[in-house]
Amino acid sequence: KPEYAFIGRSNVGKSSLINMLCNHKGLAKTSATPGKTLLINHFIINKEWYLVDLPGYGYARRSKSVQQKLQQMIMSYILQREQLINVFVLIDIRHEPQKIDVEFIDWLGQSNIPFSIVFTKADKLTASKISSNVNSYLEKLKETWEELPPYFVTSSEKCIGRDEILDYIEQINKKL
Ligand code: GDP
């Protein structure tokens, strides 16, 4: 079955987003403690596809060696899974483009892994701030990439962007 992976820095809102997508509170545990998801978790959705919860990267309070091991694990999963269709990279919409995210996105692109961007926590900003932050992110990516990835603006708090992501996945699944 096809797999769709979700990844981002710790505290980006990944567990909340997964809960929103699954529409099942408690399925992916949300946590106020950043970096709690250490292993790769799979959730089967509608018996049709797997939502893959990848560990958060760039968690400063982990030791360097743990961070490196995690990164190795994430990269080898992404490179080796034949069923992996798309990686959704979560970005907190409030922040300027961060080096670690941009480097990860560049690595995905260089590795020919299809990916999309999911901006999180949109409820925390005004509409105009959202579009200017999204634009500055896309501008940053344009420095390296000719073609821009699909992106989604979401809020798990206000349930924004859920249908868009699920429709996107469904459209891809139909063509498989
Ligand atoms: P993870 O570490 O990436 O899994 O992040 P969590 O889902 O645990 O969220 C981290 C923090 O951000 C928690 O305090 C959440 O309540 C908060 N959060 C997550 N998503 C949203 C959102 O869409 N809007 C707002 N306002 N807060 C959010």
Image (tube, rainbow, N blue to C red):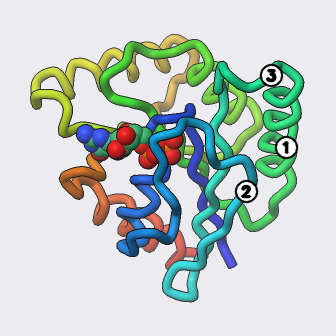
Question: Is 4 rendered above or below residue 122?
Answer: below
Q: In this image, 12 relative to 99: left or right?
A: left
Q: In this image, 14 relative to 161: left or right?
A: right
Identity of the residue drawn at 10% across and 28% down: 126
Q: Secondary structure at mark 1?
A: helix
Residue contact between numbered discs 1 and 2, judged by CB atoms under 8 Å: yes
Residue wearing tag 2: 40
- On the question of residue 61 being in view, the answer is yes
Q: Quadrant of the N terminus?
A: bottom right
Q: CA distance from mark 3 to mark 1?
A: 15 Å
Question: Is 115 rendered above or below residue 94?
Answer: below
Which disc is residue 63 wearing? 3
Question: Is 107 rendered above or below residue 27?
Answer: above
Amino acid found under the numbered disc labelled 1: Met
Residue neighbourhood size for the residue with mark 3, other residues' Cα within 10 Å, grouped as few (<14), some (14–19), many (≥20) = few
Q: Earlier in the sequence, mark 2 or mark 3?
A: 2
